[in-house]
């Protein structure tokens, strides 16, 4: 059965809705008012819609005038030099192009240069041109890694804009006091009101700002509402105590060990274990010390074999570390942050041992193991295949306690045959250990590692080195890339390192790379066309370095 078309006879208050319904149903089933079905119906529908649109617009009543926004605040910082302002506009306008097969081309990626440009501009205290603020906020909206530097550079006018555009509200959340100016430290009434009545993001910003200026005041403020906060909020607030963590925080953290939330208890225990003088650290030292000791009845021969009944000394044998992991996780251990249930695939006793050793002050081990230095302790053999577990726990303790001496011992020499070092269990562990060292020492160690082991395992290690890379590290990276080129492999096997080099290599190294821009003669076993691709990759690197040098020059002297 075929339905006959329905005609709309006369316009009314809901004419627009009728036209929309007609468009949805189709003019073969429904026609506009005064129009017969047929081939002219679609055109009649469009004409009727056009007329109704004009009528609707002409019939709009003027809206009530809204209150004008307050003028944008002044930015007291000096304006950018004209050349730097033009460069910023170029960086913000650039969009990354498509790439395929790992090939990156020879043109620099301007979007990757924006973070460096912002870092230099912030260091030199410039203010942005007002007209670039929308593009700057859009860039920060799309890249969370860019937000801190972008919002610092954008300044107070960006917050003014963010209050007018919902798309930029992230700036209010990401900037301490962004929603409203933080009260002065002396204004206790406003601080209390914001803490009691503010949104969660505002309270986090307030607590973080107070913690950076007056740690005790932030902790006391948190204590006033601690018992009534939600568990997830308590966890976030407690995490803010990492900044400026000190002995005065111990009583509050000790109370938090009895918190209802397991995550809060674990975080409190972690913070306390980062305070080597805390009561929790002392309790963990006793527990861990009971598990690890020198076994005077067993020594290791120079070849590494453990023998019973030996003594260290004249025959070249070495004392052995004996490990007796806990047999249970008692309530006291759980209260101090030890998680009783082991992850899948882990033995319970080794899981408990690792947590105890990780939380014990590292100074414990010199006293416990015969007054030996960290390097001597790490060099001792460990009985019964406990070495991996024990050394991994020492790695985590060195990172948590920021102990450079233990980190050096666990890292070992960068040129050691075993790229994993004597104690580190993974590249990630090594990178964390390096983070406890000074920038110059870090760069020197990684340079030695690359010289000995090449670039295949160095990417994570390079990521923790200061920017720009120190000269020895830069030379080691360039030499390793040159060796890889001569080996005949494709450059995109090293695209990650190349990308880091573009951002981190000192621009002064560009002149050293000129010799690598020519297409080399390819050995017989080389990948087809690899030489040309390497020349293209080095051209991109050189161009990027020179562009970075120009950007720094445009921003003027420090």
Image (tube, helix red, strand yellow):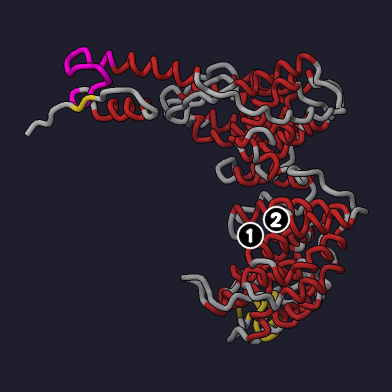
Considering only order in the chain, which callout, 1 or 2, is on the residue closer to the N terminus? 1
The spot of residue 352 in percent (x, y) is 60, 77
The spot of residue 428 in percent (x, y) is 61, 53
Q: Residues within 10 Å of mark 1 (few under 14, many from 20)?
A: many
Q: Using the rendered image of the protein, determine whether residue 213 is visible from the camera's viewpoint.
A: yes
- The single residue placed furthest to the left in the displayed view is 1
In this figure, which residue is indicated by the disc labeled 1?
A: 424
Q: Nearer the viewer, residue 331 or 154?
A: 154
Q: Using the rendered image of the protein, determine whether residue 409 is visible from the camera's viewpoint.
A: no
Q: Is residue 272 above or below residue 412?
A: below
Q: Is residue 42 magenta?
A: yes
Residue shown at 70% from the left, 70% from the top = 228
Give the main secondary structure of the magenta stretch: loop
- Looking at the rendered structure, the secondary structure element under dot 1 is loop
Q: Which quadrant would residue 266 be assigned to in this image?
A: bottom right
Residue shown at 80% from the left, 57% from the top = 193
Residue shown at 82% from the left, 74% from the top = 251
Residue shown at 69% from the left, 36% from the top = 163
Question: Distance between the Cα atoms at labels 2 and 1?
Answer: 8 Å
Q: Is residue 126 magenta?
A: no
In this figure, which residue is indicated by the disc labeled 2?
A: 433
Magenta residues? 28-44
Q: Which quadrant would residue 154 be assigned to in this image?
A: top right
- Looking at the rendered structure, the secondary structure element under dot 2 is helix
Q: Is residue 369 above or below residue 61?
A: below
């Amino acid at each position: 059965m075929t339905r006959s078309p329905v005609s709309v006879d006369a316009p009314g208050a809901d004419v627009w809705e009728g036209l929309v319904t007609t468009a949805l149903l189709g003019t073969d089933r429904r026609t506009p008012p005064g129009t017969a079905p047929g081939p002219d119906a679609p055109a009649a529908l469009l004409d009727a819609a056009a007329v109704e649109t004009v009528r609707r617009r002409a019939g709009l009543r003027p809206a009530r005038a809204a209150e004008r926004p307050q003028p944008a605040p002044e930015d007291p910082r000096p304006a950018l030099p004209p050349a730097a302002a033009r460069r910023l506009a170029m960086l913000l306008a650039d969009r990354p192009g498509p790439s395929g097969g790992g090939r990156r081309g020879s043109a620099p990626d301007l979007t990757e240069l924006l973070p460096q440009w912002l870092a230099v501009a912030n260091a030199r205290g410039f203010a942005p041109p007002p007209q670039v603020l929308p593009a700057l906020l859009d860039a920060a909206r799309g890249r969370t890694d860019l937000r801190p530097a972008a919002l610092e550079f954008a300044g107070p006018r960006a917050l003014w804009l963010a209050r007018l555009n919902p798309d930029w509200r992230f700036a209010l959340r990401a900037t301490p006091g962004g929603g409203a100016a933080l009260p002065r430290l002396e204004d206790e009434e406003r601080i209390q009101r914001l803490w009691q009545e503010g949104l969660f993001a505002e309270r986090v910003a307030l607590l973080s700002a107070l913690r950076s200026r007056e740690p005790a005041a932030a902790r006391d403020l948190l204590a006033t509402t601690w018992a009534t906060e939600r568990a997830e909020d308590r966890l976030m607030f407690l995490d803010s105590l990492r900044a400026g963590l000190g002995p005065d925080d111990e009583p509050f953290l000790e109370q938090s060990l009895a918190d209802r939330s397991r995550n809060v208890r674990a975080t409190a225990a972690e913070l306390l274990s980062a305070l080597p003088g805390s009561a929790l650290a002392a309790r963990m030292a006793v527990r861990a010390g009971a598990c690890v000791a020198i076994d005077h009845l067993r020594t290791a021969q120079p070849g590494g074999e453990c023998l019973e009944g030996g003594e260290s000394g004249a025959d070249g044998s070495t004392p052995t570390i004996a490990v007796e992991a806990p047999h249970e996780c008692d309530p006291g251990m759980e209260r101090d942050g030890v998680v009783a249930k082991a992850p899948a695939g882990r033995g319970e006793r080794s899981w408990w041992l690792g947590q105890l050793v990780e939380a014990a002050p590292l100074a414990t081990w010199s006293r416990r193991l015969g007054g030996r230095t960290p390097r001597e302790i790490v060099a001792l053999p460990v009985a019964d295949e406990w070495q991996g577990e024990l050394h991994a726990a020492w790695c985590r303790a060195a990172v948590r306690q920021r102990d450079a001496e233990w980190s050096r011992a666990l890292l070992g020499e960068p040129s050691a045959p075993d790229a994993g070092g004597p104690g580190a269990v993974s590249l990630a562990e090594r990178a964390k250990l390096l983070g406890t060292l000074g920038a110059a020492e870090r760069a020197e160690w990684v340079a030695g590692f690359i010289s000995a082991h090449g670039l295949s395992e160095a990417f994570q290690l390079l990521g923790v080195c200061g920017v720009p890379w120190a000269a020895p590290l830069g030379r080691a990276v360039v030499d390793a890339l040159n060796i890889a080129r001569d080996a005949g492999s494709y450059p995109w096997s090293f695209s990650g390192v190349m990308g880091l080099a573009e951002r981190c290599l000192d621009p002064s190294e560009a002149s050293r790379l000129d010799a690598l821009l020519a297409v080399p003669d390819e050995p017989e076993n080389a990948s087809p066309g690899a030489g040309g691709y390497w020349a293209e990759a080095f051209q991109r690197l050189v161009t990027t370095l020179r562009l970075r040098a120009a950007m720094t020059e445009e921003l003027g002297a420090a």
